[in-house]
Amino acid sequence: MNIPSREGSKFFPNFKCSKQLIAFALTLVLSLPFAVSAQDAAADAGGADVAHGETVFKNNCAQCHAITDERVVGPGLKGATSRNDMAWLTKWVKNSQAMIASGDPYAVKIYNEYSKAQMTSFPGLSEEDIKAIFAYVDNAATAAPAEAAAGAGAAAGAPAASSGPSDLFMIVLVALVVVMLLVLGVLLVIVTILSKAVAGGEASEGDTDFMTRLGNSLKGIVADPAIRSAVIWVFALLALKATVDGAFGVGVQQGYAPKQPIAFSHKLHAGEYKIDCNYCHTGVNRGRSAHIPSANICMNCHGVIKKESPEIQKIYTSIENDQPIEWVRVHTLPDFAYFNHSQHVNVGGVECETCHGEIGSMEVIQQRSSLTMGWCIDCHRTTEVNTKDNKYYDNLVQLHASESQEALKVEDIGGLECSKCHY
Ligand code: HEC
Ligand code: HEC
Ligand code: HEC
Ligand code: HEC
Ligand code: HEC
Ligand code: HEC
């Protein structure tokens, strides 16, 4: 049956218009996933606030507070807005010490409850920032209790695929819209046929009963080139997006920042107190591994500093029970790749920050580089070898200079040879 014939459109005068409608709606679906993925999945009413609040919270508060009622350094913030009003909360966040000093009863009570642990003051946060933080806290408590629990972090665990929930959300959304469109299409066809039937006349001519006409109309929709191409585009783009996301994501954990069992802050220790990386990561100049410090190294200072803090108490518990602190590993290369810290730090003179980012400003360590083979190779192609005061390289430098105008790069000393990194 070659449907949208002239007779067809005479039979169904509205039909053309409804086809366009469907094509338009399909095009909408096409743009939907991209629009959605650009936004936060949780962005509903006040979503922008919530998203902003999440960022502010993670940057300033997450090391001491959970958004559940779980205690970290400070109390869990779930329900904080029902315990105190916004004016109180704003004053507290900006300068909690001043409030305690002024004798505010709740402030004094909670300060004592938390053994006089001092909360950082945030005079720099605006009222909007603080409002957004609590919008985020409240939203997390009501909207997604499961996610909130994950955010509060049962310590270790596998790295969560960061895009997990929003991907699922997108798929469900798209599936829903597709189903709705199909239903809409069928309804439109039925309406057209019925209205024609009511108008009477030619509609009842010939042997076309209701079912065949319904079938014909559906075929018409399927055969329509505009609708066909819209459908094909939707699926092609969705497939493309999934493939690209998947391919780039395999084994790459850039941005991975798991919650650690103790709220140890590099920002505080390496940033503010300027403790040398080497003091704790004793392997960086000597060997392959940088090493994670044992609890004894912490005790050099925390034998006296802040002994009463619940976080420091965890160090004591670890030593008393002879149980090492179970830090969650952040950076890992697969076993078949060889990387040596001393070669890079000591011999090569590469700064920690070049590979690890601004550690001195991180409350929680985050993997900043991709750690892929391409990342290693790119740097070896572009970085000059540190040959200064290194007799080992003298002959090599001379030899290289006689052959090339360019500076000696890591690639020239074998930095691209497979066997240097794989064995
Ligand atoms: C260095 C750790 C630390 C940081 C960072 C921190 N807090 Fe606190 N917070 C505490 C402690 C500890 C208490 C308990 C009171 C005390 O000892 O001063 C507390 C108490 C609170 C309370 C009162 C608790 C309640 O609900 O009854 C609120 C609200 C609060 N903090 C909000 C925040 C917000 C918002 C941020 C981020 C802008 C933040 N805190 C950052 C440690 C911290
Ligand atoms: C007071 C001790 C101490 C100092 C000083 C210190 N670190 Fe750390 N570092 C730790 C501890 C403990 C961990 C494990 C917990 C964590 O990841 O936060 C760690 C973890 C790390 C990790 C992630 C390890 C992994 O699991 O992949 C990197 C990278 C790192 N530190 C780099 C640095 C750099 C760079 C400096 C100097 C700017 C530095 N650290 C200074 C104690 C320290
Ligand atoms: C060289 C000294 C030094 C070493 C080593 C050190 N710290 Fe600290 N740490 C400090 C100082 C100083 C403070 C800030 C104390 C304050 O705020 O009054 C601090 C604060 C902390 C806090 C925040 C406590 C609170 O409640 O405010 C934690 C948690 C902590 N350190 C954990 C560790 C861990 C874990 C290690 C071992 C990996 C470690 N520290 C090693 C000096 C050190
Ligand atoms: C050339 C890049 C590069 C530089 C420079 C670098 N790192 Fe690393 N770091 C890595 C890689 C890659 C890993 C993962 C190693 C693995 O899994 O075998 C790593 C892992 C770590 C770890 C986890 C424990 C371990 O040894 O596997 C710590 C801690 C660390 N680095 C600290 C440092 C510190 C401190 C410095 C500066 C003194 C530094 N790194 C300089 C690339 C670098
Ligand atoms: C930021 C730049 C940088 C990155 C990133 C980097 N390297 Fe290097 N790498 C160097 C430099 C500089 C040297 C030369 C050190 C020297 O003088 O011996 C070097 C040397 C090496 C060598 C010794 C080469 C030889 O012939 O002696 C190996 C092996 C190596 N790197 C492995 C890796 C691996 C594996 C990675 C990725 C996980 C990596 N590197 C990432 C800068 C980098
Ligand atoms: C500078 C160090 C370095 C050199 C040189 C190097 N690789 Fe790699 N290679 C790596 C690292 C690091 C990984 C792990 C990457 C990851 O986990 O994503 C890797 C991964 C791989 C993989 C696994 C697939 C993948 O991409 O994860 C293969 C296969 C491989 N390398 C082959 C080679 C061959 C063949 C050569 C020589 C032409 C070579 N590599 C040279 C560092 C190197």
Image (spheres, helix red, strand yellow):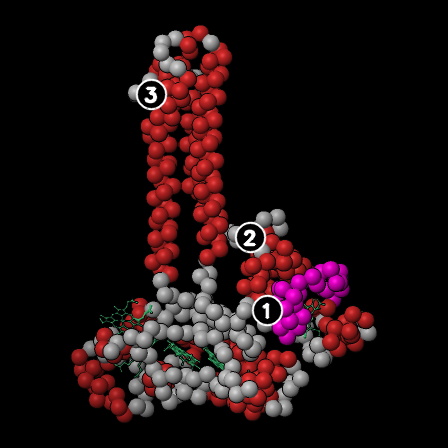
Camera-side residue: 174 or 266? 174
**Left or right: 419 in relation to 351:** left
Q: Identify the residue position indicated by label 2 in the image.
A: 42
Q: Identify the residue position indicated by label 1 in the image.
A: 62
Task: Mark 1 and ligand 1: say if the CB distance to the nearest ligand atom is below 8 Å.
Answer: no
**Amino acid type, callout 2:** Ala
Instruction: Give the percent coordinates (x, y) of residue 284.
Output: 40, 85
**Left or right: 236 in relation to 77:** left
> Crowding at label 2, few (<14), some or many (≥20) Cα neighbours within 10 Å?
some
**Amino acid type, callout 3:** Ile
Q: Are marks 2 and 3 in contact (CB under 8 Å)?
A: no
Q: Identify the residue position indicated by label 3 in the image.
A: 3
**Left or right: 298 in relation to 11:** right
Kindly identify the residue that appears in the image at 78 percent across and 70 percent down.
106
- Can residue 24 be spotted in the picture? no
Please tell me which of labels 2 and 3 falls first in the chain.
3
**Amino acid type, callout 1:** Ala
Quadrant in the picture for residue 219: top left
Please tell me which of labels 1 and 2 falls first in the chain.
2
Distance from the alpha carbon under mark 1 to that under mark 2: 19 Å
